[in-house]
Image (tube, rainbow, N blue to C red):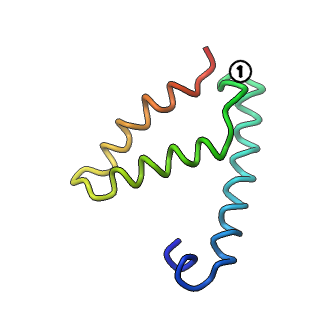
Amino acid sequence: MHSARDGEPTLGSTCHAMISSAGDELLDRARHMNAVRPDVTIPQLLKIVSAIALATEEEPDGPGEAGQLLNPAIDGVRAR
């Protein structure tokens, strides 16, 4: 995404559109299976994942800590 910010703006928007489209399809399937709450959206999920990635990118065990933060975040989107 650095190249999208620095020189090729259409790359960033194209990538975002592809991720959003694929995510919408997956989320729709999850809704039909009652695996997620009906009010959860892809933009919300992408913001959560992005925030966790940013919060842990400088940590010594970034991936491990990201997983630890992601688990409680995902529990909030699961259907009850």
Report which quarter residue 28 is drawn in.
top right
Identity, as a three-letter code, of the amino acid under mark 1: Asn
Count the marks: 1
As displayed, is residue 7 above or below residue 69? below
Tell me what residue is drawn at x 43 percent, y 31 percent.
71
Left or right: residue 46 versus residue 37 is left
Residue position for label 1: 34
SS under mark 1: loop
Tell me what residue is drawn at x 65 percent, y 75 percent.
11
Q: Quadrant of the C terminus?
A: top right
Q: Crowding at label 1, few (<14), some or many (≥20) Cα neighbours within 10 Å?
A: few
Report which quarter residue 32 is drawn in.
top right
Q: Nearer the viewer, residue 67 or 1?
A: 1
- Most distant residue in the bottom direction: 7
- Most distant residue in the top direction: 80
The spot of residue 38 in percent (x, y) is 72, 26
The spot of residue 21 in percent (x, y) is 75, 53
The spot of residue 35 in percent (x, y) is 66, 24
As displayed, is residue 10 above or below residue 35? below
As displayed, is residue 59 above or below residue 65? below
Tell me what residue is drawn at x 33 percent, y 51 percent.
56
The spot of residue 20 in percent (x, y) is 70, 53
Left or right: residue 60 versus residue 80 is left
Tell me what residue is drawn at x 69 percent, y 77 percent.
10
